[in-house]
Image (cartoon, grey):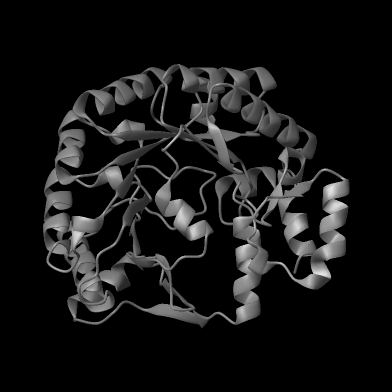
Amino acid sequence: MAHLYIHIPFCHRICPYCAFFKHTPADTDMRGFVQALISEARLRLPAGYAPETIYFGGGTPSMLSPTHLGNLIQGLRETIDFTRVREWSFESNPATLTAAKVQQWCELGITRVSLGVQSFEPRLLQLLGRTHSPEQVAQDVALLRRVGIPQINLDLMFSLPGQTPAEWQHTLHEALALAPDHISTYNLSYEEDTDFFRQFGADAGDEETDVAMFETADEMLTAAGYRHYEISNYARPGCRSQHNLACWRGEDYHALGPGAVGSVGGERYHNAEHTGRYIAALSEGKLPPCSVERLAPETRRTELLGLMLRTDEGLPPELLRPQDSEFIAMLQAEQLAELSDKGCLRLTRSGRLVADEIAVGLI
């Protein structure tokens, strides 16, 4: 199976908590950027490439104008066979969403829009550097429904500086009132090279608060009929993110764009995080500067442990070794994990709170 990720690094404003490669458009040649993505697809992807999922992430893909996005997709269709695509995701900032853009997305065949909502509290939105309002989110969801986008995801964040339990409950309540198909809830982490890290420090946050807010989300969202299918993700029946599931299962995926990371045939490549050099290289008919890492079998297993343990599918028996049996028995005794009828090791709610530690114990 083939999967494709496309990185759009532009943001109209840099959020203080975000560690992904991104920047404002500034004086970037947008036509040149679009042509560079088309050229990378032609140079990097195999002949007859037909992905089952496509994911536009960022940055803020919704910053692409209808003209630039239309030219991009037209160019990509010269290399990519879109006929097998069953899920096409597109990340959007609520502040950059317009009726014209949504109409185009629907006509192009985009099936899933993910809105970076983060909070329904104006005070916290301001702290996060977000420029949309709670009312705007509701308007955007209504617009997406009216135009006919099949699936909508809302991204939310918890354990924000000064966030109270009541504020988190209110955000979850407001999200549920909009009846999205999918909800992602992310525990804020303080990453290096972000304003939040410089302002609050690496040791910011409180584990007790993290646990309480995680449990609040689990209780409220599952009670509303959402399947908690990955530590940070909840979906209505039939609405799990197929692209992300493929990544968590360790399936191959290609990636295009500055800063994009792909994993194919046991090799991981990472394009340099520099949009100017990316455009310059491809304008000369060369792939952009990138690093390549060959993944040894043990490295591969270690990464899969960390990824698949996060899902409610759990670890398949082939990733478990005889020497793990004593540790697994301990996890079961402490009600941190269970074995399915097919022998998959699945974490309980309590186990998900210490998923990283459990993964380390299985290495």
Q: Residue furthest front?
A: 341
Place residue 13 in its image quadrant. top left
Is 247 situated left or right of 148 in this image?
right
Up-down relation of residue 87 to residue 362 (above or below): above
Asked if residue 289 shows in the view, the reply is: yes
Tell me where residue 235 appears, x and y as whole percent: 48, 35
Is 342 situated left or right of 120 in this image?
right
Tell me where residue 231 appears, x and y as whole percent: 61, 44
Q: Image point 38% across, 50% down: which residue?
A: 59
Is 296 situated left or right of 255 in this image?
right
- Numbered label tally: 0
Residue placed most toward the observer, 222 or 274: 222
Asked if residue 27 shows in the view, the reply is: no
Place residue 238 in its image quadrant. top left
Is 115 situated left or right of 107 in this image?
right
Q: Image point 18% across, 75% down: which residue?
A: 283
Up-down relation of residue 349 to residue 279 (above or below): above
Q: Image point 63% across, 76% down: which residue?
A: 299
Up-down relation of residue 94 to residue 243 (above or below): above
Residue placed most toward the observer, 221 or 346: 346
Tell me where residue 212 appears, x and y as whole percent: 74, 30
Q: Quadrant of the C terminus?
A: bottom right
Q: Quadrant of the N terminus?
A: bottom left
Q: Image point 34% across, 53% down: which residue?
A: 55
Residue placed most toward the observer, 276 or 76: 76
Place residue 48 in its image quadrant. bottom left
